[in-house]
C-alpha cells in the first residue's frame, strides 16, 4: 500500500510541476505580446508626432512667429528672412506679404513695400493686399503734396490706384488736389509752364508724363465710365490759368490727345480749345516757309510775301481787332519754338512768345498790325530776329521790311510812290545803329546809316 501511494504521489507532483511550467510559459508569451503591442504603439505615436510637427502649415506658423519676434526686437533683416522662408514653404501666405510690407515701411522703403504687396495680390488675389497696396501709394502722394511737391509723378501714383479701383474716393479727391496745384492759377502765378521745354532743342518739361497719365485715366474711364471720372478727365485736358505755354514739339501730340478724348466726352470747352489749337497750327504752317527764307538770308522773298492778300488781311485783322483766336495788337510775334494758349471769359486764344520772353528762341518773325499810314495809305511791314549765335542777347539784330507810300527820286525831283525799305537794326549794350536801304530794289535805291 505504501508503494502504491508513493507512486501516486509522485504522479501528482509531476503533474503539478508540468502545470506550473505551462503557466510560466503562458505568462511569458503574454508579456511578449504586450511588449510587442507597446512597441508598436510607441512607434505609431512617434511617427505621428513627427508627421504632425513636419506639416507645412506648422512650419509656416513657426516662421511667421519667428519673424514677429525679430520685428519686435528691431531685427528687420532676420525678420525679412523668416517671412521670406514662410513664402518659400507656402507662396500664398497672405500674412507673410503683409508682414514683409510692414517690415519695409518700418525702414521707410515704400517702393519695396508696394512691390511685395502687388506681387502678393497677383499671387493670392487677396483683396486686402491690393487695398494695402493702394493705401501705400496714396500715402506717398499725400506726403508729396504735404511737402509742397506736386508733379506728374504724383498724378501717376493716383492714376495707378484708380486703375485698380476707379471709384476710390480718396484717389479722386487727391486727383482734384493735384489739378488745383498744377493747372489752376493764383495771384502769385497765372502761367502754366509744365509743357514748355527750357530749350527748344531738348525735351525737359513734363508733357510726355502728362499725356501718359491722361491716356491711362482715359482708358480707366472707357473701361468703367462714370460722371466722376469724366469730370476729372475733362479738367486735365484743359487748364484754369490765364496762360499755358507749350513747346512746338508737343503741339501735335496735345491736339491728338484732345481729339481722341473729345470724341468720347464731347465737351464744349475742349472743342473750343481744339479749334483754337487748329488755328494756331495753321498760322505756324503759314509762316514756316518765311522762317526758312529768313534763316537762309533771303530777305528779298519777304517782298512777295507781305504783298499777298492773305498777309494783308492778317495785318488788317489786328488793326481792326478782329483777329479771332490769335491774341495780340500792334507788333505780333510768331516763332517756331512754342505757343501760348490763353484762357479767359471768352474762351481760348493763342499767341507766341517774343524774343525777350524766350531766351533760347530759334528766331522770331513779327507781324506789324498797327496803323501806319503815308498820305492815307497803310504800310505793310514784317521783321525778323534770328537766334543768338553766342547764347547772349547782345549784339542783337533785327531785319525790317516795309512796303510804304513815300517820296522816291533824285535830289532834283521827288515823287510819292509805293516802294520798299529794308533796315538792319543792330543793338548793343551801348545802343542801336540802323543801316537802311530806301527804295530797296527800285530805280532810285539809296542807303543811310544812323
Image (tube, rainbow, N blue to C red):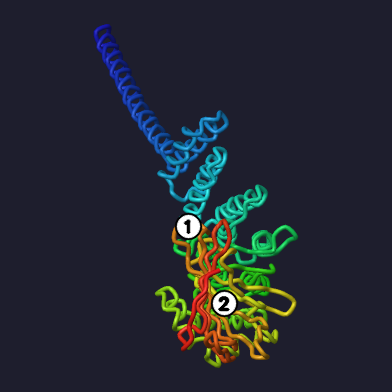
Task: Tell me, yes or no, if residue 163 can be seen here.
Answer: no
Closer to us: 46 or 100: 100
State the CA–CA distance, disc 1 to disc 2.
Answer: 35 Å
Q: Where residue 46 sits: x, y (%)?
A: 39, 32
Closer to us: 223 or 442: 442
Closer to us: 273 or 287: 287
Q: Earlier in the sequence, mark 1 or mark 2?
A: 2
Q: Where residue 256 sits: x, y (%)?
A: 51, 78
| Quarter holding residue 356 | bottom right
Q: Quadrant of the C terminus?
A: bottom right
| Quarter holding residue 105 | top right
| Quarter holding residue 194 | bottom right
> Which of the two discs, 1 and 2, sits closer to the camera?
1
User: Residue 28 — which label?
Assistant: none
Residue 276 to residue 157: above or below: below
Label 1 Cα neighbours within 10 Å, binned few <14 / some 14-19 / many ≥20: few
Residue 268 to residue 113: above or below: below
Secondary structure state at the residue bearing disc 2:
helix
Label 2 Cα neighbours within 10 Å, binned few <14 / some 14-19 / many ≥20: some
Q: Quadrant of the N terminus?
A: top left
Task: Tell me, yes or no, if residue 427 can be seen here.
Answer: yes
User: Residue 258 — which label?
Assistant: 2
Discs 1, 2 touching: Cβ within 8 Å: no
Q: Residue at x 54, y 61 (%)?
A: 359
Secondary structure state at the residue bearing disc 1:
loop
The residue identified by callout 1 is 391
Q: Residue at x 50, y 44 (%)?
A: 96
Q: Residue at x 68, y 83 (%)?
A: 371
Closer to us: 264 or 252: 252
Q: Is residue 196 left or right of residue 376?
A: left
Amino acid at each position: 500500500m505504501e508503494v502504491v501511494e508513493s507512486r501516486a504521489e509522485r504522479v501528482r507532483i509531476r503533474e503539478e510541476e508540468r502545470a506550473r511550467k505551462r503557466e510560466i510559459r503562458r505568462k511569458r508569451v503574454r508579456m511578449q505580446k504586450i511588449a510587442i503591442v507597446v512597441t508598436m504603439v510607441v512607434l505609431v505615436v512617434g511617427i505621428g508626432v513627427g508627421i504632425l510637427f513636419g506639416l507645412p502649415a506648422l512650419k509656416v506658423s513657426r516662421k511667421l512667429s519667428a519673424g514677429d519676434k525679430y520685428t519686435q526686437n528691431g531685427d528687420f533683416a532676420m525678420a525679412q528672412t523668416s517671412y521670406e522662408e514662410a513664402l518659400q514653404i507656402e507662396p500664398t501666405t497672405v500674412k507673410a506679404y503683409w508682414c514683409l510690407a510692414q517690415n519695409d515701411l518700418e525702414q521707410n522703403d515704400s517702393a519695396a513695400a508696394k512691390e511685395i504687396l502687388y506681387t502678393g495680390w497677383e499671387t493670392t488675389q487677396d483683396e486686402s493686399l491690393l487695398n494695402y497696396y493702394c493705401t501705400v501709394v496714396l500715402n506717398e502722394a499725400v506726403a508729396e503734396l504735404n511737402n509742397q511737391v506736386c508733379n506728374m509723378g504724383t498724378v501717376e501714383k493716383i492714376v495707378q490706384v484708380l486703375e485698380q479701383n476707379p471709384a476710390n474716393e480718396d484717389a479722386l479727391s487727391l486727383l482734384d488736389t493735384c489739378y488745383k496745384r498744377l493747372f489752376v492759377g493764383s495771384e502769385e502765378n497765372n502761367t502754366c509752364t509744365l509743357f514748355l521745354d527750357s530749350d527748344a532743342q531738348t525735351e525737359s518739361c513734363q508733357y510726355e508724363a502728362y499725356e501718359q497719365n491722361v491716356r491711362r485715366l482715359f482708358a480707366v474711364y472707357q473701361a468703367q465710365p462714370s460722371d466722376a471720372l469724366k469730370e476729372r478727365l475733362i479738367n486735365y485736358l484743359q487748364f484754369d490759368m490765364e496762360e499755358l505755354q507749350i513747346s512746338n514739339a508737343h503741339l501735335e501730340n496735345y491736339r491728338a490727345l484732345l481729339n481722341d478724348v473729345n470724341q468720347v466726352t464731347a465737351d464744349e470747352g475742349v472743342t473750343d480749345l481744339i479749334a483754337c489749337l487748329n488755328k494756331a497750327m495753321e498760322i505756324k504752317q503759314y509762316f514756316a516757309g518765311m522762317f526758312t527764307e529768313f534763316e537762309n538770308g533771303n530777305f528779298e522773298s519777304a517782298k512777295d510775301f507781305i504783298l499777298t492778300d492773305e498777309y494783308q488781311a492778317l495785318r488788317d485783322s489786328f488793326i481792326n481787332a478782329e483777329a479771332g483766336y490769335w491774341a495780340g495788337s500792334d507788333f505780333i510775334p510768331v516763332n517756331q519754338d512754342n505757343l501760348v494758349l490763353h484762357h479767359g471769359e471768352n474762351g481760348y486764344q493763342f499767341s507766341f512768345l517774343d524774343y525777350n520772353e524766350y531766351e533760347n528762341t530759334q528766331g522770331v518773325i513779327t507781324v506789324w498790325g498797327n496803323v501806319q499810314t503815308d498820305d492815307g495809305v497803310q504800310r505793310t511791314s514784317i521783321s525778323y530776329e534770328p537766334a543768338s549765335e553766342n547764347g547772349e542777347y547782345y549784339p542783337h539784330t533785327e531785319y525790317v521790311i516795309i512796303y510804304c507810300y513815300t517820296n522816291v527820286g533824285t535830289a532834283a525831283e521827288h515823287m510819292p510812290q509805293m516802294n520798299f525799305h529794308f533796315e538792319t537794326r543792330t543793338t548793343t549794350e551801348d545802343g542801336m545803329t540802323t543801316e537802311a536801304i530806301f527804295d530797296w530794289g527800285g530805280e532810285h535805291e539809296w542807303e543811310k546809316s544812323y
